[in-house]
């Protein structure tokens, strides 16, 4: 796990810029819902980004009412322009706290959006690895509100790519601490 | 030419995973749920009241005083699902171990970023069983 001269907060460990550990409570974080990039179908998804490390990834909680869905998002190597969000190659991890979700995934945006693609049903206690190279969409397919934790990290060996679907104002809304 | 080796998304349930740390130690369980070579892992840690982790270090150099030396981990984050924990942290191993170092009290809904460069110890300081989700990533 040793990382020589790791980049952290714009400086390197070797130059002794060390940050103090910190916490944030989910109730202190502004909820982020849709519309992302004008997509009105995600406006009941509540995302609470908790901790974000610029350029590396984030951790947060997602709360969805029954029937609600995320947008389609892509971790593919190339952006074909069809997903609502393009992140570039990433690993993402979910841990289901409560509720039932279905993850739709594949290469075909239309199937992922319609729910006719391959899928994985998720229940409390499930951990999910969203591997790089696919399009995804996650929907609450249960009868009660659901919540999962998520953590995302850029795939090793890939540089930060130009992401799509996030206006600059949205980024700062998602991660208000970046402004502080 | 693509340099991405495609793998299928996958899930695992916490009940299917054996405890990887704390084996044989009543009241302490760490389950690595998903591990990705070259990146890191995510998992769940459960602790009964008064149980604690070892002293672990994310410092740049290993002074040999912590129980577990990771090196400067890039991203070590917790999310408290239930229970109350206290994080003790600092450079001085003795203070961290005794609980006289700086500290952060953690309650359900708290997310914590354990920044690299410090020694740490986490203890269940509540009266009930506690559980937190963790993720540790390291980019090379």
Image: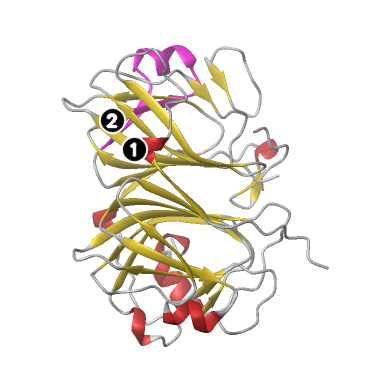
**Vertical arrangement, residue A84 with respect to residue B77, above or below:** below
Q: Earlier in the sequence, mark 1 or mark 2?
A: 2
Q: Identify the image quadrant of the C terminus of chain B.
A: top right
Quadrant of the rendering where the N terminus of chain B is positioned: bottom right
Output the chain of dot 2.
Answer: B
Is disc 1 placed on a helix, strand or loop? strand
Q: Which residue shows up at 73% across the image and 54% down it?
A: A157
- What residue sits 20% from the left and 27% below the top? B126
- Label 1 and label 2: CA atoms lie apart by 9 Å
**Both on one chain, marks 1 and 2?**
yes
- Image location of residue B26, percent across then percent down: 31, 14
Picture quadrant where residue A1 is located: top right
Q: Is residue B30 above or below residue A40?
A: above
Q: Secondary structure at mark 2?
A: strand
In the image, farthest residue toward the right: B1
Question: Mark 1 — on which chain does it sit?
Answer: B
Q: Where does label 2 land, which residue? A: B85
Judging by the rendered image, the residue that carries numbered circle 1 is: B132
Q: Nearer the viewer, residue A53 or A114?
A: A114
The residue depicted at 45 percent of the width and 80 percent of the height is: A113
How many neighbours does mark 2 have within 10 angstroms: few (below 14), some (14-19), or many (20 or more)?
many
Residue A174 place in picture, x, y as percent: 41, 68
Q: Marks 1 and 2: which is nearer the front?
A: 1
Magenta-drawn segment: B87-106
| Image-based side of A138 in relation to A130, left or right | left
Q: Name the residue at the left extreme.
A: B127
Q: Are marks 1 and 2 in contact (CB under 8 Å)?
A: yes
Q: Is residue A87 magenta?
A: no
Relative to B27, say whether A156 is above or below: below
- Image coords of residue B38 (percent x, y): 67, 42
Colour mapping: secondary structure
């Amino acid at each position: 796990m040793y990382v020589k001269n790791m980049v952290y907060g714009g400086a390197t460990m070797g130059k002794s810029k060390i940050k103090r550990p910190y916490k944030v409570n989910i109730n202190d974080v502004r909820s982020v819902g849709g519309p992302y990039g004008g997509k009105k179908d995600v406006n009941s998804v509540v995302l609470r980004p908790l901790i974000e490390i610029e350029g590396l990834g984030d951790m947060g909680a997602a709360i969805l009412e029954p029937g609600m869905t995320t947008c389609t998002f892509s971790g593919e190597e190339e952006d074909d322009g069809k997903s609502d969000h393009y992140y570039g190659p990433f690993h993402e991890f979910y841990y289901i706290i409560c509720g039932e979700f279905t993850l739709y995934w594949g290469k075909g945006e239309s199937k992922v959006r319609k729910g006719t693609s391959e899928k994985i049903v998720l229940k409390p206690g499930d951990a999910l690895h969203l591997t790089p190279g696919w399009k995804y969409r996650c929907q609450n397919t249960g009868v009660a509100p659901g919540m999962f934790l998520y953590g995302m990290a850029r795939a090793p060996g890939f540089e930060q790519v130009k992401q799509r679907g996030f206006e600059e104002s949205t980024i700062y809304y998602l991660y208000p601490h970046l402004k502080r | 030419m693509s340099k991405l080796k495609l793998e299928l998304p996958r899930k695992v349930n916490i009940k299917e995973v054996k405890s990887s740390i704390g084996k044989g130690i009543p009241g302490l369980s760490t389950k690595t749920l998903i591990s990705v070579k070259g990146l890191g892992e995510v998992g769940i840690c459960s602790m009964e009241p008064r149980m604690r982790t070892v002293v672990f270090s994310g410092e740049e150099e290993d002074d040999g005083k912590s129980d577990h030396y990771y090196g400067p981990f890039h991203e070590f984050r917790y999310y408290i699902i239930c229970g109350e924990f206290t994080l003790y942290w600092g450079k001085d191993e003795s203070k961290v171990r005794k609980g006289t170092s700086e500290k952060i009290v953690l309650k359900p809904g708290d997310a914590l970023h354990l920044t690299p460069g410090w020694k740490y110890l986490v203890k269940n300081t509540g009266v009930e069983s506690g559980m937190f989700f963790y993720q540790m990533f390291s980019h090379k």
